Amino acid sequence: MSESLVCYAYTSRYRGLDPEADLASIAAAATRNNPALSLTGVLLYDAGRFVQVIEGPREGVWALQRRLLADPRHSDLAELFEVDCPERTFHQWQMKAYRVEALTPMSRPEVIALRDAYVGVFRPSARDFLALVQTYLQSRPVNP
Ligand SMILES: Cc1cc2nc3c(=O)[nH]c(=O)nc-3n(C[C@H](O)[C@H](O)[C@H](O)COP(=O)(O)O)c2cc1C
């Protein structure tokens, strides 16, 4: 029996005052809750915006979406895509949180592609977007 997986990605605007503390508490919530919902993914924070990729069974993704919509730490959630996906991209990640600005500077094409995804001008295909995030993370240290 194979589970049917969806992959959801969105960008939102950070509304708090202390990104470091908020990222830590969000990462703790993800560690607490995501395994039971069988959710994996990645959370990026940079310059006042989040980009999050969430993958897992539809009901689990929707349950998290409902909580995210009610979370005052961010606003203006804009969906990048929600697609059925044959397999997980971030299968070994519960939900790693990265503070992009604290890491090695990105290459120019990475910066442009992520920035465009942030502002929603450019709509990458789900596959291209996931490949971009993966390439980006693979070239970085594993710790936030
Ligand atoms: C950008 C962002 C990403 C989040 N990602 C997750 C997540 O992956 N998993 C999770 O359980 N909560 C996440 N949260 C927190 C939820 O909105 C909510 O506060 C949390 O799930 C409540 O968990 P608790 O009832 O165990 O305290 C995120 C919040 C924000 C602002």
Image (tube, rainbow, N blue to C red):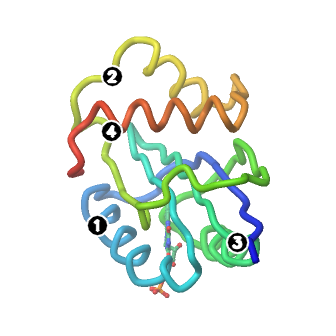
* Neighbour tally class for label 2: few under 14, some 14-19, many 20 plus, Cα within 10 Å: some
Quadrant of the drawing holding the N terminus:
bottom right
Asked whether the residues under the numbered discs 2 and 4 touch, taking CB atoms below 8 Å apart as contact, a structural biologist would say yes
Q: Nearer the viewer, mark 3 or mark 2?
A: 3
Give the mark nearest the N terminus, 3 or 2: 3
Q: Residue at x 43, y 20 (%)?
A: 111
Q: Which residue is mark 4?
A: 100
Mark 3 belongs to which amino acid? Pro
Residue 89, above or below 37: above
Q: Earlier in the sequence, mark 2 or mark 4?
A: 4
Tell me which numbered mark, 3 or 4, is placed earlier along the sequence: 3
Give the side of residue 49 with respect to residue 25, left or right.
right
| x 38%, y 37%: residue | 47
Q: Position of residue 119 (x, y in %)?
A: 62, 30
Which residue is identified by label 3? 57
Judged by depth in the image, the label closer to the viewer, 3 or 1, is 3
Residue linked to disc 1: 24
Residue type of the residue flagged with mark 2? Met
* Helix, strand or loop under label 4: helix
Tell which of 64 and 125 is nearer to you: 125
